[in-house]
Amino acid sequence: MNVTERKMLELLKKGRDQHGVVAVKAEFEAEGTRPDEFHRLLELAQRADLKVALKIGGCEAVSDLFATKVYGVDYVIAPMVETRYALSKFIDAKNKTHGPDEERTEFLFNLETETTLRNLDDMLPLAKEGVDGIVFGRVDFTLSRGMPRGAINDRSITDAVLTVARACADAGLELVVGGSVSPDAIDPLKEVQAIRLDRFETRKVIFEGDAVTRGSIRDGIANAVDFELLWLKNKRDYYQAIAQEDAPRIEMMEKRAAAGAPPPTAAAG
């Protein structure tokens, strides 16, 4: 591990011990996590004794599902599951790759659009039989309503999350809430937690639901932001080093090619 990664590890341990951090997260979907990046995250999680969540590329991303078995992922999330049919495809795919009685891994689907919310009642009976829970993606849900990203903590968005929290509580499904979790989200999350909130997440860090009631939650969110900033810087430095590793040889080869080129032909008189 390099110096930055050691700092990241200390932040994760601090989050685990003081702020209710229980897992880290990556995405094969919108974030486009590459395998080498994911291996670094897995090592950090293992050393910090945290679980790992992975959002796969789609409801029927079979190759991604097989990869979650290789990596030993604890939580698998399927994005953009908007209908009962899409949910059935996810359940069929995960049963194919993991078997219907998988115990180690939990499977959840993203509720991130107005369409999914309208279809939720139709989806719940199947969800109760085939998955473990729902992840409410507040950013995409807000945008799907034609509202700006900054409206994520508006009353109407919180009311939608509360609707899903009640549905999950009644159905015995886990509820995870994500999307721009900042200090401004604390009060809305407390409302949700009073009904049902198993976990909530930033882009890379997942907290247990009860963490939102801790007096240290603001420090916990700041700690998660520090981790994510170091993650991005470490990723930048890693790929910059790769991009530059052949620079001296490229320069040498360009000089060699220029030295071996024939002299320019004089213009005809």
Image: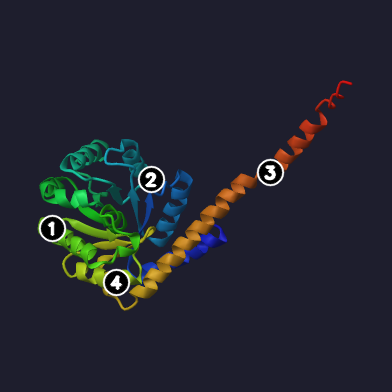
Identify which residue is drawn at 74% across, 40% down: 251
Which residue reaches farthest right? 269
Residue matched to label 1: 167
**SS for callout 4:** helix
Q: Quadrant of residue 153?
A: bottom left
* Cβ–Cβ under 8 Å for marks 2 and 3: no
Q: Amino acid at mark 4?
A: Ile
Residue 217 in picture, x, y percent from top left: 33, 73
Q: Which mark is residue 28?
A: 2
List the residue tagged with mark 3: 247
Percent from the top left, x then y, of residue 44?
A: 44, 57
What residue type is disc 3 on?
Ala
Q: Earlier in the sequence, mark 1 or mark 3?
A: 1
Q: Is residue 111 above or below residue 261?
A: below
Q: Position of residue 266 (x, y in %)?
A: 87, 24
The chosen color scheme is: rainbow
Amino acid on which disc 2 is placed: Phe
Quadrant occupied by the C terminus: top right
Q: Which residue, given by chain and number where applicable, does mark 4 sit on?
A: 186
| Mark nearer the N terminus (4 vs 2) | 2
Label 4 and label 2: CA atoms lie apart by 28 Å
Real-space Cα distance between discs 1 and 4? 21 Å
First in sequence, mark 2 or 3: give its number: 2
